[in-house]
Image (cartoon, rainbow, N blue to C red):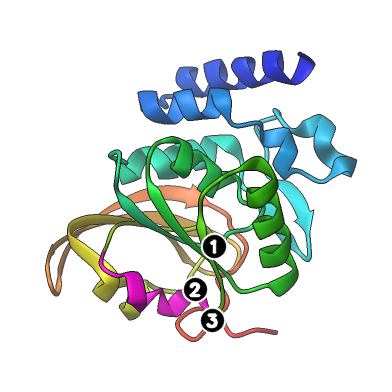
Amino acid sequence: MMYKLQRLELVESLERKGITDKAFLKAMREVEREKFIPSGVRHHSYTDIALPIGYGQTISQPYTIGIMTQALDIAKGDKVLEIGTGSGYQAALLEKMGAKVYSIERHFDIYNEAVKRFDKLNIRVHCKHGDGTIGWEEFAPFEKIIVTAGSPGVPENLKKQLAIRGKMVIPVGNKFSQTLQVLTKLADDEFDVEDIPEFAFVPLIGREGWKDQ
């Protein structure tokens, strides 16, 4: 009951900050964020901050998740590619909104934990362990693509795998600060780009991202 009240309070705070997507807010009310957060920081489940999930990775701040998801303009039935499964919380929200979610995670332990979590919570997400920067060509094109780590640029493979009139949200910049880019694909090599500053994500590692240290 305590978590439910905190969840509703968090959703109200996001509405005050300008998150208006009704389907997203409904999903936020229903998906239990505490089930995606390590026990040591679970008491912060409904604080509007990013939290560590181990292996140097984080679960994003709820407001950031709201900004990104709202920018995607999810419609029921959209095929969505998520780069960076992480805890699985973002994918769970997208699935609750009626999207068909395909999610890639490069860190095997995080991938394995997310798959177990999805099974336990009966969340239907197609998962893959691998380099997210090269996308998932087998299931392309995607109506929406969301990248949950900061990239030095927009990977060409992801551009190719985005459907015409599709949207991609990706943080682009250096390893410490990024601008959220919202790309709408107008034609094969033509994109409309909107910039939303300023964010800080963990680095996107891969062939078309940052090199692994």
Q: Quadrant of the C terminus?
A: bottom right
Across and down, in percent, residue 175 comes to 59, 69
Q: Secondary structure at mark 3?
A: loop
**Tag in front: 1 or 2:** 2
| Most foreground residue, 3 or 44 | 3
Across and down, in percent, residue 152 comes to 46, 74
The disc label shown at residue 149, or none: 1
- Pointer 2 residue: 132
Q: Check disc 1 and give the amino acid type.
A: Ala
Q: Secondary structure at mark 2?
A: helix
Instruction: Name the residue: 28% across, 71% down.
Output: 161
Whether 197 is drawn above or below 160: the answer is above
Residue 105 within the segment the image draws in magenta: no
Q: Is 3 positioned to the left or the right of 127 in the image?
A: right
Asked whether the residues under the numbered discs 1 and 2 touch, taking CB atoms below 8 Å apart as contact, a structural biologist would say: yes
**Tag in front: 3 or 2:** 2
Snapshot quadrant of residue 28: top right
Mark 2: few, some, or many residues within 10 Å (few <14, many ≥20)? many
